[in-house]
Image (cartoon, rainbow, N blue to C red):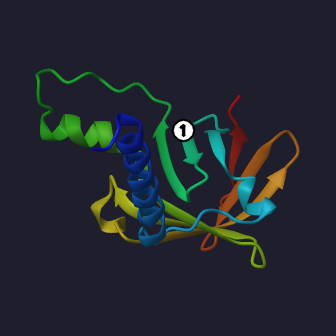
Amino acid sequence: MRTIGELGVVLLLVMLITQAGARITSGQTAPASDEAKRFIGTWRLVSDSSTGLMYYDGLGNMAAQVMPNRARPKYAGAQPTPDEAKEALTGYLAYFGSYSVDERAHTIAHHRKANINPGQIGDDAVRRYEFAPGDRLILTPIDSGNRIIWERAR
């Protein structure tokens, strides 16, 4: 008959093996280099017209949400009307997925697994990156010159 302590050790080993297997089979890779690890954390959008947060974790996951700085009326009822729903979503960006860093090209790719915009689910959003003074991160979409400035949250 096994003791409770032996069963606890066996259970702990099973949990650790399961977690290790989940990370290996998830298809994600954790950032390995010091440069890639600089992304890890919470970032706030620096903008007069929008507010937003972006998160990168040490397992290769990320999420971003940005919304315009404008008054949005509350819904009149429990469910929005089509016009109310359109007004609430216009200008709102929200997605999550994994990310990968290409240090040679100085780009980061957001591999979007889910998105408020159904047409962008499964797309990769690739941006050039630059770490700037003041704990800032500047992202520039590769297909535009629009510089998006983020500041590390404290």
* Label 1 SS: strand
Q: Residue at x 46, y 39 (%)?
A: 67
Quarter location, residue 106: bottom right
Question: How dense is the environment of label 1, judged by Cα within 10 Å: few (below 14), some, or many (20 and up)?
Answer: some
Which one is nearer the viewer's eye here, 78 or 131? 131
When the figure is inspected, residue 112 is found, relative to residue 58, above or below; the finding is below
Q: Residue at x 48, y 37 (%)?
A: 68
At x 81% / y 54%, what residue is drawn? Answer: 131
Determine whether, in the image, residue 10 is placed left or right of residue 129.
left
Say if 140 sits above or below 105 in the image.
above
Say what amino acid the circle numbered 1 marks: Gly
Q: Position of residue 27 (x, y in %)?
A: 45, 72
* The N terminus, quarter of image: top left
Residue 50 rendering spot, x and y as whole percentages: 55, 37
- The percent coordinates of residue 12 (x first, y second) are 43, 46
Q: Which residue is mark 1?
A: 52
- Residue at 36% over, 66% down: 120
